[in-house]
Image (cartoon, helix red, strand yellow):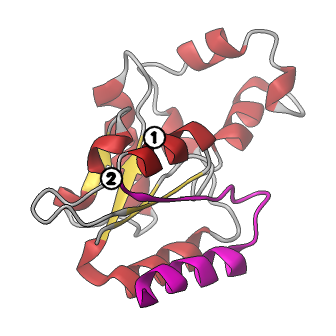
Amino acid sequence: MMLYLDMDGVIADFFGGLEKKYGVEHWKNLPDKEESIFNLKYTDFFNTLELYPTSNELVLFCKNLAKNNFGICSSPLTGDEHNSAYWKRIWLERHGFMPKVSNCIFTRQKQKYAVGRIDGSPNILVDDKPSNIDHWNKCGGIGIRYQANEDSLEELKMNLQAVYKD
């Protein structure tokens, strides 16, 4: 069983980064959200993101729980896959969060990794986006929704421990 963490919204403050980049109090105040995100293409935006206060504790907990089966499964920007994945990886390395290279996945189709390729066992994805969790679960994985700036890290840790005990 693999344990994957999403980056944006889970360990990297994507929306806080948008607010800072565009000088708005809340990202929902951006006049054109799609254009604002489009303008991130071909930049190092993902390497500028801040950690959440819980990021270090969450990653350490997951690495200890899953051992060599810890990974990252994060979506790159559409139309900027190689560049945004590159800067996400640099960010992971800079913060000491980089898993084994084979466990670092950048894809918009996360559900393809919901089950183990060899034995079909369910993998875990911790993600803030409900549709990612829904797709993951429908494909046989165990999706756990967690948004770092809203949800309890302690509750997430208990949920992950429960999955590993079963």
Magenta stretch: residue 162 in it? Answer: yes
Say whether residue 165 is left or right of residue 130. left
* Type of amino acid under label 1: His
The answer to the question of whether label 1 and label 2 lie on touching residues, with beta carbons closer than 8 A, is: yes
Q: Considering the numbered disc 1 on the image, is that residue within a helix, a strand or a loop?
A: helix
Boundaries of the magenta span: 140-166
Residue 65 location, quadrant: bottom left
Q: Tell me where residue 134 appears, x and y as whole percent.
A: 53, 43
CA gap, disc 1 to disc 2? 9 Å
Q: Tell me where residue 160 appears, x and y as whole percent.
A: 52, 78
Q: Return the mark for residue 114.
A: 2
Q: Tell me where residue 40 appears, x and y as whole percent.
A: 53, 21
Magenta stretch: residue 49 in it? Answer: no
Q: Tell me where residue 149 appears, x and y as whole percent.
A: 76, 57
- Is 123 situated above or below 163? above
* Type of amino acid under label 2: Ala
Say whether residue 79 is left or right of residue 104. right
Image point (39%, 79%), residue name: 63
Q: Residues within 10 Å of mark 2 (few under 14, many from 20)?
A: many
Pointer 1: what residue? 135
Q: Residues within 10 Å of mark 1 (few under 14, many from 20)?
A: some
